[in-house]
Image (tube, helix red, strand yellow):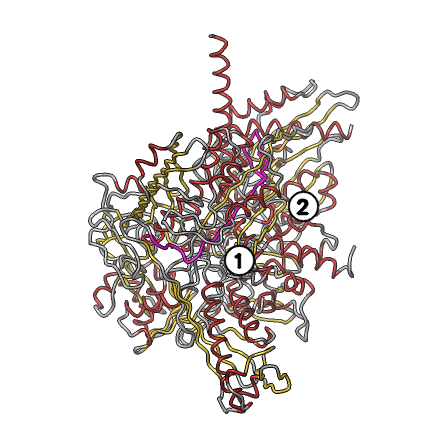
Amino acid sequence: MLDEHGDEAKVVAGSTALTIMLRNRLIDPSVLVSIGRLPGLADISADDGHLTLGSLATHRDVELNPIARERIPVLANTFHKVANVRVRNVATVGGVVAEADYASDPPAVFLALDAEIEAEGPNGKRSIPASEFFLSFYTTALAQNEIVTAVRVPVPQPGTRAVYEKFVTRSSEDRPCVGVAASMRLSADSDITEDVRVAVGAASETPQRYPDLEKMAVGKSMTEDLARSIAEGYAERIDTLDDMRGSAWYRTEMVKVWVRRALMHALADARAQA
Amino acid sequence: MIDARERVTGRVPYTINVEMPGMLHAKLLRSEMAHARLTRVDASRARELPGVVAVLTGEDIVAMGSIQPRFGPVLRDQPILAYGKVRFVGEPVAAVAAVNADIAAEALDLIEVDYEELPAVFDADAALADGAPVIHEEPPHPGPTFADIILHTGAGSNMCNHFKLRRGDIDAGFAEAVHIFEDEFTSPAVQHVPLETHACVASHEGDRIVIHAATQIPYILRSQLAEVFRLPQSSVRVIVPTLGGGYGAKCYPNIEPIATALSMVARRPVRLVLSREEEFVTITKHAVRIRMKTGLRADGTIVARKVEAHFNTGAYADIGPRLIKNGGYGTGGPTDIPNVWIDSYAVYTNLPPAGAFRGYGISQAAWAYETQADMMAERLGMDPLDFRMRNLLETGQRFATGEVVDDCHFKELLTTVADKIGWDASAPTRVIGPDNNGSGRKAVAKGISCIIKGTVTPSTSTANAKLNDDGSLNVLTSSVEMGQGIHTAMATLAAEEMGVPIERVTISQVDTDVTPYDQQTSSSRSAQAMGAAVVGAVREIKEQLVQRGAELLEAAESDVEMVDGKVQVRGAPSKALTPSEVIRGTRAGNLLGRGTFQAHGGLDPETGQGLASVHWHQAAGAAVVEVDLDTGHVKVLRYEAAVYSGRTINDVQAELQTEGNVAFGLGQALFEELLYDNGQLQNGNLGDYMVASMEDMPTELGFNILENPERGEIHGIGETSLPPVMPAIANAIYRATGVRVTDLPVTPEKLLRGMQENAAAAKQAIEAELVA
Amino acid sequence: MNVNLTVNGRAETLVAEPHHTLVDALRDNLRLFGVREGCGVGMCGACTVLLDGKAVSGCLVLAPLAEGRDVVTVEGLEGNSGELDPIQQSFVDHTAFQCSFCTPGFILAAKDLLADEPNADEEAIHDHLAGNLCRCGSYSKITAAVLDARDRLSGGGQ
């Protein structure tokens, strides 16, 4: 169907973003393809070390889902921080990744957790790593005739603690100026860091993650200074943007603050459970 | 509130609910250019679209000849639809009425507009510079609505109006001063964001206009429509349903002439309701730059003040020429300053019109003088509270306009809130954290402020009351209910005066065919002004009851009085009649009472001396803020608002209005700001423009509503507690961070930059010392 | 197109264009004026309705997507003989409104909250209701009203 209509067709699931575009006459599609009733796409399930979020699962579904809360609490927490409850009751997992709005919260967490976006089109199914999915403003690796069917998130190894820090500069209801997802796992018998991930969202066109900077912490004991060094590395590399929530200069400063804070927060959590 | 049930069941009758037989739906095509000549507006294809009933362009209106193409409450400078030129992005250029909104929107796409772009100007200073593009070539054309207004317009320039105030001898004042401080303060344009946008349903058929409008000014709207459509005022009927918020946004006409003109052509009723995005380019709060020079005696008392205030009034005057008077004299502040020199200007720019906004110029003025108060206190090494206590007005002292101010409570208001937050100048800042889970250091500190605000003077309100033969009472008033609870307040006063339970009183909806003249529902004036008119109307009825009752009781009028709502012979409770018995007994049908309130005053056009306000509104505020020292993020932990009500009619509603002022002030202190890029609004929707949410509000909020039962005079409180909020919060932030932000809003980014600059300067100073 | 659904307990058919929102369809077809568009972008909550029991922004739901679903507006909260819902009654008792354009949205958001969290505390109320804007700023009275409604619904206290 999408092939047949090309650019004239738009896929609609929760319809939150699309309705705004229609209302503001930003788009004028001749065909709206509702996938809201496709069976199975709203499921949230766990198997072989993955949590699978069906693309039609709403933000609120993820937020409240007992399996999600148990296996990857940071996901539930992050989805809880998106917009307001009315939007979360409607906006879908597939929608938030497919729209690729830079000022969203979930993409950074997906990137930090090595999630894969499952897509399906006339040429079959494929799985796209989050690191290759977000290309630029409102642009993803999805082909025009593909839809997102699910996001598969590897369940972090036992002992991992992850946080998502959402920083807003205006009202509590604002979108993030900067959002940082960080996870950390300490070795079972010492304070040595085995695994660290950091992804920064909302600061630039797409969420950013630098594995070589993450590795600075592996095999060492995390300290405030080390966290600061990693944060400065992120700040140096991210090409921050200007908008009404903060200038590029301010965002760079906030990347320094919030990467450090997210790491220290994750560390405190990891130590607390050790 | 008297209509609480309607309010919780969704049944409040707003203008957007109004439907009329044959009603059409209107949409507006708006300018994409900030300043441009309209070389072609071709609506021919739109006219041909099936379902379109009427299409109008500015040239169509001019060509009709039968109606005045321009309107405006002070200067007739605003075209119903742009013709010749457009003057701001978003100005209505063409209007369509169709059988439904979809067709009207489709028709807009078929209208072709060619622009020839002109140089544009967006800043008041730039607009007054030599060689600036002139926005209005023709001389201004004043109208009759505000006969008292002082006009010093600058024809052929962008000077829309100039207000002057001269008190004492300014040069001598500064000569006497031991300390002189000069500072500059700016506040940006913001929007009112009433959740109900501008809306009206207009019907112009035959020689009659009937319009339902969400407006705060039924009678001004009536006179404007009568003038534009060249009809007697009696032929224009303005009906005002309950408003979904006003805050000054709905104070003067803007969309009503368009809907009426469309209806005139279509000969059917036309509904026009703005979208949120349109609301943002319809009316705003004035952006202002204030240059303030203040001279102090050695003891910290203010001896002289010179002010230059530039109010950016946008492309059309609206109420700007009048607002700069309040915003001008307001910079005198709550202090008897013997030598004052104020020049306040309304300046045209190519931005959406700025007009009345809750606080009416005083927020901008207070932002300047209450910020400067803390800056001056610091420079003198004085406690900001002590500094203010030396300067605050006391009963019998004079305001900048030279008038004696009576019934002053500034000191009491300020000390009340200072005590509540535990003001202690010697220990201003407390630093907490960092804690061990990654959150940084935070500084907590306190700030205070105190303001004076006038109410529109001269002003007039009238009311009628009708006592029915069952003893129930109808009150006919043109005061607009917009959430402030004015109808409940009027019912309360009427019931009290009549001696009947409030359930026996009904307040009319506003309908200029029925409800008598009221100047406007604004300026925090209605409780006092309309309240006096309503009480007067009921008193007139009581006089008639006594007269007629005396007849029935066969007693001399002088021997009869009203006791507990009954007419009785003095000292003889057994000889008493209920109002119902009096009306029925004399076959009066009903008894009608009329009440009038009139406040007199005015200022000299050259010196600004005279009587600016019939009485003075007074408020203070105290804030406790917590600032994240790594990010500049601010949380208001506590806010104490104090306001002088004279006499509170309804405690809960007084608190609600005060909380509303805190919500408005907190948003304006920390984040509200309209952002323009070459005149194009960048954040004209509620995803991009933030207003205060429940979570943004102070964690702890206190209301201190001060009464003076001895006098019993009602003081309006709808706006009074707003102006202190911004400086109180910013003063607290300064004490927490050492960063003085003089341009609102105080954003985290400005604070972080300031803190980094301070740190760098401190480091440099230490290094310089080491080198030496 | 026709949209068949249940509104306030009754089977209804809305006539709507595919791009029409649920707010417009409910107002235009059924004159349910308690549903009001305030911003059109899901930020203010004036258009809140319960869709299959959950609070949603009516301005962000295309009317055809409500096919077969259950919609409750503020008009559906009153009992058969006009008695107010306990949340509505609490809002009356606390005067938890000024212009009240936002009030139905707050009441329905509170309904959604108390259905999920009958013991919601002040923090939970703020978290859940912060996405509803009251420009008049009646927030402290609204919080008090919802706390009171919680206690009424749970039978007079904790």
Across and down, in percent, residue C11 comes to: 62, 71
Across and down, in percent, residue C21 comes to: 51, 60
Give the extent of the magenta segment.
B610-636
Co-location on one chain, circles 1 and 2:
no
Task: Judge whether residue A98 is colored magenta.
Answer: no
Figure quadrant of residue B376: top left
Residue type indicated by callout 2: Glu
Q: Is residue B477 left or right of residue B732?
A: left
Chain bearing mark 1: B
Q: Is residue B519 visible?
A: no
Quadrant of the frame with the C terminus of chain A: top right
Viewer-proximal residue among A103 and B595: B595
Circle 2 residue? A63
Across and down, in percent, residue B606 comes to: 27, 49
Viewer-proximal residue among B238 and A243: B238
Circle 1 residue? B646
SS at mark 1?
A: strand
Task: Judge whether residue B614 is colored magenta.
Answer: yes
Residue type indicated by callout 1: Gly
State the CA–CA distance, disc 1 to disc 2: 51 Å
Can you say whether B522 is above or below B546 in the image?
above
Single out the mark in the foreground, 1 or 2.
1
Figure quadrant of residue B513: bottom left
Chain bearing mark 2: A
Q: Residue at x 69, y 49 (%)?
A: C122
Question: Dot 1: few (<14), some (14–19), or many (≥20) neighbours within 10 Å?
Answer: many
Magenta stretch, main secondary structure class? strand
